[in-house]
């Protein structure tokens, strides 16, 4: 690499005439003065390597007083560089190349480097061959390059040993660089991933999110965080990506640091499950059931999607607890929840409202359909008592059914109608299904979904 500020001298750029060293002294003095005007070091050497002329810059480079002769330049070089210097000079003398450049460490000056450029001068009248050697102190440039290389090595080491996946993406979404952890996540070598599109490391479900985030970062120049899914042979890996624009090799790019948040997602799902699920029956708890049912009511008001509401209560449940104990009562609640899952569709909303009371939202269902499914469950419970060890615990359920009506302004009104039908079933002897029509409910049943 040509050091900054180093002007190479060649016979074409420096038209040195054929010299006769027997000419008067004033010619020699004029030439010396001319050479001393150069800020770079200039040496003229004969075929044996003897220094014929050296300008003031050379003396400064080698820290030799101007009046002191230099004689042999190799005494300023460490032993390992002497052979290299002589090889370069001899190649020029043999005419193998018009010029050549190399770097040498100065003897006794750790960290001081000179750049030497060798060129052959025109052949002299007496036939001897002279070599022009230009010298430039490049210690500062060398130190800067070494620091740059050291910084690059440290960056690479940190980049590759990072516990997070790191990648550099071009504005077009091309992978310009990536670290070891990224390769381990996607189970592909770095060589295969470089130059590929981001679709090679992100699942199709999240590619639009990544692309949109890249565009925003490049447009605003600001850091941005978002979630995505890395591809993986086993299952996609959820990651949180912190990304910002950087200069990468002279071009604008985006550096993304992707942290594996699998454990966080598992914990989040567990907490969400615990917050929304009844721990005994694994049905929706009261709060979550009402939230989902209210969402269905809003859909009904906006789009007219009909639904039926069922309120269910186990008959004489207190007697079961008193006779068999609370453990048996808990087992009965779990068994009834299982029978509910067998009867209703996966899309229906099932919840434990409290104690032995349950509720169901039957999606896309008419009053007639709601009564039919409720009766099916009632019979299943009546014919399927709880079998616990050697004991058989019979039980029944009372059910009230209604549907959403056009004049309903809230979910509460629908639930009150279903409750009224449930308590009528209780008063009429239990173990039966009663219904309550909506004041302005649809007269015709909608097309039913298959069970």
Image (spheres, rainbow, N blue to C red):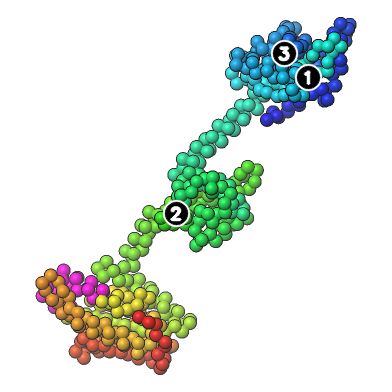
Left-right relation of 441 to 150: left
Left-right relation of 258 to 18: left
User: Residue at point 31% right, 88% down?
Assistant: 371
Q: Residue 216 at what x, y percent from top left?
A: 59, 57
Q: Residue furthest bottom?
A: 443
Q: Is residue 354 above or below residue 98?
A: below
Residue linked to disc 2:
232
Q: Is residue 48 above or below residue 299?
A: above
The part of the chain drawn in magenta is 317-338
For marks 3 and 2, give the CA distance.
65 Å
Secondary structure type for disc 1: strand
Q: Is residue 296 above or below residue 225?
A: below
The disc, 1 or 2, on the residue closer to the chain's N-terminal end is 1
Residue linked to disc 3:
59
The disc, 3 or 2, on the residue closer to the chain's N-terminal end is 3
In which quarter of the view is residue 299 placed?
A: bottom left
Left-right relation of 350 to 398: right
Secondary structure type for disc 2: loop
Which circle marks residue 120 in the picture? 1
Q: Are marks 3 and 2 in contact (CB under 8 Å)?
A: no
Q: Residue 236 at what x, y percent from top left?
A: 44, 57
Q: Nearer the viewer, residue 357 or 192?
A: 192
User: Residue at point 38% right, 75% down?
Assistant: 347
Q: Are marks 1 and 3 in contact (CB under 8 Å)?
A: no
Q: Nearer the viewer, residue 447 or 209?
A: 447
């Amino acid at each position: 690499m040509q050091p900054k500020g180093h002007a190479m001298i060649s016979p074409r750029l420096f038209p040195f005439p054929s010299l006769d060293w027997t000419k008067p002294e004033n010619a020699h003095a004029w030439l010396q003065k001319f050479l001393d005007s150069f800020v770079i070091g200039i040496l003229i050497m004969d075929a044996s390597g003897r220094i014929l002329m050296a300008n003031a810059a050379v003396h400064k480079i080698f820290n030799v007083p101007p009046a002191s002769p230099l004689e042999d330049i190799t005494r300023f070089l460490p032993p390992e560089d002497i052979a290299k210097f002589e090889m370069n000079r001899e190649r020029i003398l043999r005419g193998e190349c018009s010029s050549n450049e190399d770097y040498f460490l100065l003897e006794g000056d750790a960290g001081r480097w000179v750049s030497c450029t060798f060129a052959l001068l025109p052949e002299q009248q007496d036939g001897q061959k002279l070599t022009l050697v230009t010298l430039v102190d490049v210690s500062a440039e060398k130190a800067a390059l070494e620091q740059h290389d050291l910084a690059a090595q440290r960056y690479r080491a940190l980049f590759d040993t990072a516990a997070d996946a790191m990648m550099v993406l071009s504005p077009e979404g091309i992978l310009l660089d990536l670290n070891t952890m990224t390769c381990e996540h996607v189970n592909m070598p770095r060589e295969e991933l470089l130059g590929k599109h981001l679709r090679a490391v992100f699942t199709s479900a999240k590619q639009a999110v990544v692309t949109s985030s890249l565009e925003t970062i490049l447009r605003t120049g600001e850091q941005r965080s978002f979630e995505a899914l890395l591809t993986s042979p086993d299952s996609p890996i959820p990651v949180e990506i912190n990304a910002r624009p950087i200069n990468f090799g002279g071009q604008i790019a985006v550096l993304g640091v992707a942290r594996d948040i699998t454990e966080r997602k598992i914990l989040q799902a567990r907490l969400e499950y615990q917050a929304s699920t009844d721990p005994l029956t694994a049905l929706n708890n009261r709060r979550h059931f009402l939230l989902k049912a209210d969402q269905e009511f809003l859909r009904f008001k906006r789009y007219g999607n009909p639904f039926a509401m069922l309120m269910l209560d186990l008959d004489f449940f207190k007697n079961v607890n008193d006779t068999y104990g609370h453990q048996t009562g808990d087992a009965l609640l779990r068994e009834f929840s299982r029978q509910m899952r067998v009867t209703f569709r996966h899309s229906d909303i099932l919840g434990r409202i409290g104690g032995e009371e349950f509720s169901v939202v039957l999606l896309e269902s008419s009053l007639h359909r709601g009564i039919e499914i409720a009766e099916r469950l009632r019979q299943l419970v009546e014919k399927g008592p709880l079998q616990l060890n050697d004991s058989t615990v019979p039980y029944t359920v009372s059910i009230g059914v209604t549907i959403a009506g056009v004049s309903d302004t809230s979910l509460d009104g629908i639930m009150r109608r279903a409750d009224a039908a449930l308590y009528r079933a209780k008063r009429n002897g239990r173990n039966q299904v009663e219904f309550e029509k909506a004041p302005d409910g649809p007269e015709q049943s909608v097309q039913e979904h298959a069970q």
